[in-house]
Amino acid sequence: MTALTLKLHNYCAGLEVYHNTLASARSGFQSFDRWQNGHFRNNLILGGTGSAMITGSLTPYSTLDYNAYRRNNNTGPLIRWFDGTKRVDYSSLQDFNTGTGHERHGTRVDYDIFVRGRAPLEGISAEPVQYNLRLLPGAAPVDTGYRMPGINDDLIGRAPDLGCHERGAPSVHYGPRNRRRQLIRIHQCALPDDSWPDTDRLRSRRRWRDGDVRSGWLPASPFLLTTRSEAARLSSHELFSPGRFR
């Protein structure tokens, strides 16, 4: 909940903006209108007042599609877009698509898609308990997103949901984890001492460090794969040292 949900300043380039839920007391997405090579997919963009989106891109190969917007006012443009040469107001997503080629699959939504949500009020701090931005059953953004291999493979349903929450999936955890719980997970994920020769065991650690999850196991951290006896012997400091298996 902020006045500016995306701050794309200083001619930033190479943007991949996927699966965000943006809520603002003003425009859902208002930013410096000269970013470059940006690609936006599966975002929920909801504001409180003004146009749904006020921004633009200098590069014609920037793309926006499969995003959903809230119309904040009954009057005025839905989108104000700068294409590098001129600013144009668009009253609908269809007009925006016709004029720019963006948002062929774009849709409109409101705060009633959420378990608990409303338009933030400018100048008033929002408390976390006031909002639950998970999608309601049957909400329009459910199963209507764009499939991106390696990005949203954990979808539940026929297609990804829009926004930052996939309906039916566990809530994303932000902030510190419980160390005792992590230690338990380390023991659960540790390998039997006689699983592999030492060289293979070391190779496995390197694969985990580099993000290879083909075995289907999910350690608490990519640095923590070890044998059961090692896990029991190591101190918490050693277990949680990022450089341990480098």
Image (tube, grey):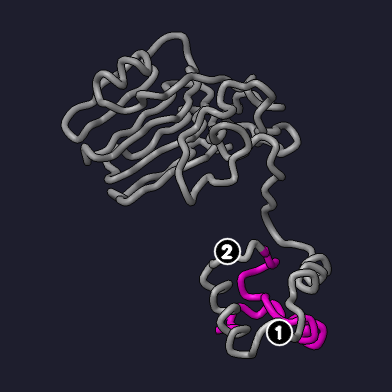
- Using the image, determine if residue 94 lies above or below residue 42: above
- Using the image, determine if residue 6 lies above or below residue 184: above
Give the image location of residue 108, x and y in percent. 48, 19
Give the image location of residue 238, x and y in percent. 71, 84
Q: Which mark is residue 56?
A: none
Picture quadrant of residue 246: bottom right
Picture quadrant of residue 200: bottom right
Q: Is residue 224 magenta?
A: yes
**Callouts 2 and 1 close, C-beta under 8 Å:** no
Region in magenta: 217-246
Give the image location of residue 109, x and y in percent. 53, 20
Q: Mark 1 belongs to which amino acid?
A: Glu
Q: Which mark is residue 238?
A: 1
The residue nearer to you, when weighing 161 against 33, is 161
The residue nearer to you, when weighing 71 against 7, is 71
Q: Can residue 244 be seen?
A: no
Left or right of 4? Residue 199 is: right
Question: Which residue position is annotated with label 2?
Answer: 214
> Main structural element of the magenta stretch: helix, strand or loop?
loop
- Mark positioned earlier in the residue sequence (2 or 1): 2
Q: Mark 2 belongs to which amino acid?
A: Arg
